[in-house]
Amino acid sequence: MTHRNLLLSVLAAGVVLGILSTLAAEQVDKVTSTESFCANSCHSMSQYIAQDIIYKTSAHRRNASGVLASCGDCHIPHDLVPATWVHVKSGIIDMISEMSHDFSKAENWQNIKPRLAKKVREEMRNNDSQACRHCHQMNQIAVSSEAGQRAHAQSYKNNKTCIQCHFNLVHEATPIHQGFQ
């Protein structure tokens, strides 16, 4: 085998390996962004989120259109590289948290929940509520009440993003932290 043929073989093998790795990463992302994975992978998620009546009856989980947002729709970016990074980073953090806290005691969950809500809200504010915008087209939102129409008009004028007003949509209410709005 000549030097050129060896180089072409290595290059072809690298391309095939790269394609297979990308396809595998997409499948892992798809599986780990599902409702069943999130609800069953962590004790705290299955006990305090998946079974929560507020979550189960929220407009994002039950609506006339039949379109349901899953955990990944709101908490995982929709591009492969950022999604993979969030899965790895959050998975490690969540695993450490599950091992270092006794979430069988509801008070331990209640104690950590404000910090978790602050983290997610800040991330969403900093990325201009990209998860919301992935499903909702802002110029197509038809707010029915006059107060809602005024609030939306004011939010566009003041460059507020979705999460700054809609911060308790799906989960049990958690007070906003100082300086958020």
Image (cartoon, rainbow, N blue to C red):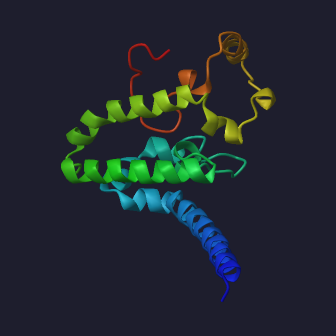
Nearer the observer, 53 or 12: 12
Q: State the image coordinates of residue 95 (x, y, percent, origin top left).
A: 30, 54
The quadrant in which the N terminus is found is bottom right
Q: State the image coordinates of residue 141 (x, y, percent, origin top left).
A: 76, 29
Q: State the image coordinates of residue 104 (x, y, percent, origin top left).
A: 21, 51
Q: In this view, does 51 lie to the left or right of 60?
A: left
* Rendered position, 147 above or below 55: above
**Extreme residue toward the right, this view:** 140
Q: In percent of the image, x 41 and y 46: which residue is there?
A: 52
Does the rendering let one see residue 135?
yes
Nearer the observer, 28 or 3: 3
* Rendered position, 87 above or below 1: above
Q: In percent of the image, x 70 and y 78: which residue is there?
A: 4
**Extreme residue toward the bottom, this view:** 1
Does the rendering let one see residue 50?
no
Q: In this view, does 56 lie to the left or right of 92?
A: right
Q: In percent of the image, x 19 and y 49: which residue is there?
A: 100
Q: In percent of the image, x 56 and y 43: which residue is there?
A: 74
